[in-house]
Image: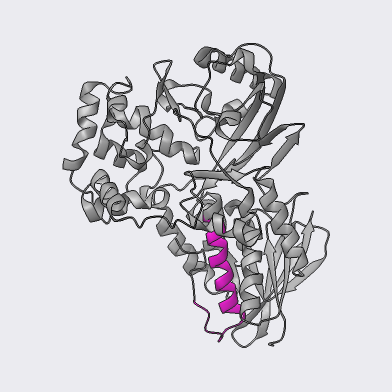
Amino acid sequence: MTRPRTVVIVGGGISGLATAFSLQEQATKADLTLRCTILESGSDWGGKIVTHRVGEIITEAGPDSFLSQKQAGLDLCTKLGLADQLINTNETGKKACVLYGGRLHDLPEGLLSFIPKQLGAFLHSGLLSWTGLARMGLEFAVPPGSPRDDESLASFLRRRFGVQAFERVLEPLMAGIYAGDAEQMSLRATFPRFFELEQQHGSIVRGMMAAKKSAVPMSTGRPRRTMFVSLKHGLGDLVTALTNRLAQQGAELRVGARVEAIRVRSHELGRWMYDLILHDGSALSAEGVVLATPAYVSAELLRPLTPIAGGLLDMIPYASTATVAMAFPRTMTSAIDGFGFIVPRTEQRDVIAATWTSLKWPHRAPADQLLARCYIGGVGREDILQLDDETLVAKVREELAAVCGIKGEPRYTEVNRWWKAMPQYTLGHLDRLTQLDAAVSRYPGLVLTGAGYRGVGIPDCIRDGAAAAERVMQDVWGGTNLARRHTVGTS
C-alpha cells in the first residue's frame, strides 16, 4: 500500500458526488489509500436533483429523468444497487405535442432521430406547410458545412432543414434542453453528433439511417429501456444512495462548508499542496482538488492562481429557470393525454414546455389526479422569474387554460426557482475549454468538472466526474500507469 493521499472535492451536486464515487472505486482497484472529503456550501446534497414527496405525489424540482442511451447513468445505478428501481416512461400511443398558432399539434414518433416512424402523421400534422415539408425533405441534398467553423445550432438546423422546421419543431426540441437561444449555442458543444453525421455522411438523415442499420441488437439479457428513464421513488434516491455509499467507504461529507479561497504551496519536487480556506476561517490541505462547482464559482476561486482561467470561466454564461408543478383533479383534465408539449420561441409564451408527469411516469400521483410540471425562464425569458410565486402560478394557469383547457383550482402547487443554473455552451465554447485546460495545467492535481463544460445531463456529469477522477489519480499518484485525461474531462 502507498502512503495515504488527500483529495478534496468542492461541490456536492451529482458531478462532485460521482467524482468522489469514481475516485474511491479507482483507488480501491489500484490498492491505493485515499482520504476523500466532499464539501458542499448548501445544506443538502445533489445540487439540482431534488425530489419532493407530499403524500402520494412525487415531484422533481430539477431534472426528472436521464437518457438511457448514455450508459454512465445506468451503470452508476447498477453499481449502487438501484437497477431494480429504474422505470421506463409509460406506454402510450401519443408521446408529445408542439404548440403552433395557438394550437397543439402531435409530434410524430421518431422525430428526435430524424426518422419519423409515421410519415403520414407528420405530413398531416399541420405543423409545416407543403413548402416547409418539401424543404425539410431536401436535407439529403444540402452540402456539408465547413469542418473548421463553429456554427450556431440555429444556423445549422435552418441550413439543413429549412426555416419552418427550425422555428416550429427543432428549435424548441433542441434549444429547450439547454433553456438557451439557438442563435448563440455552439453546435459542436451541444450536439456534436449532428456535426459528425454531416461530415461523415453528408446528411443527418442519411447518417441516422446508416447508424440504425449498423446498430448492434440489444442483448436479450438486458431490460428494454425507453429513451428516458427515472427511479421509482424519484431521482433523489440516486443522491441518497451515493452519499450513503461514500460515507460507508470512509469519505467525509460536509454540508454548510463554503470554500472562500485556494492557496498553493510547494509540497515536494514537481508537486503542489492546496490549502482550502473555508468561510469559518478553518482550512483543509490536500494534494488533489476537484472543483465541481458552477463555472462562475470556480472562476472566483481560480482567479488569484490563474487570471486567464478565471476570465475563461467567466465567459460561460448561465440561464435562470423555474419549474411550476400543479396537481389537478382528473375529472377536469380527462381529455389530456400524451407526455406534454413544447413551445417554440415564435409563440412568445411564458411557458416554454409542460410535462404531464403522472401520465409520463408511474408512481407520481394518485389515479384521480393529473400532475403537471411547467417550465419557464431561460435565455431572453428570465424577467418572469422576478414575479412572486402566487403571480407566477396564476400566469402558468392562464396559459394551461388557453392551450389545453385546464381550468379550476389545483389541489397542490409547487414553485422551484433555479438561479444561474443552466450553463450555456455558446459559440467558441470548445476552443475556450482548450485554453482553460492549458491555463489550469500548471497546477497538477487541480481539476474542473461539472455541467458547465462537456454536457448538462446527469449521465454527462457522471461520465465527466469519472474522467476528472482519473486525472486526479494520475496527478496525485504519478507513476501508477493510470490513463491521463484532460483537466476539464473528455467527451
Where on the picture, by quarter, is residue 478?
bottom right
View extreme (front): residue? 220
Q: Which residues are magenta?
A: 460-483
Residue 304 in view here: no
Residue in the image at 72% along x and 82% along y = 4
x and y percentages locating residue 479 in the rendered image: 55, 87
**Depicted 198 relative to depicted 251: above or below:** above
Q: Quadrant of the C terminus?
A: bottom left
**Depicted 459 relative to depicted 304: above or below:** above
x and y percentages locating residue 336 in the rendered image: 53, 19
Residue in the image at 65% along x and 11% along y = 408
Front residue (pair 217, 437): 217
Residue in the image at 75% along x and 49% along y = 44
Left or right, residue 278 beside residue 431 = right
x and y percentages locating residue 17 in the rendered image: 66, 59
Q: What colour-coding does the image apply?
A: one colour
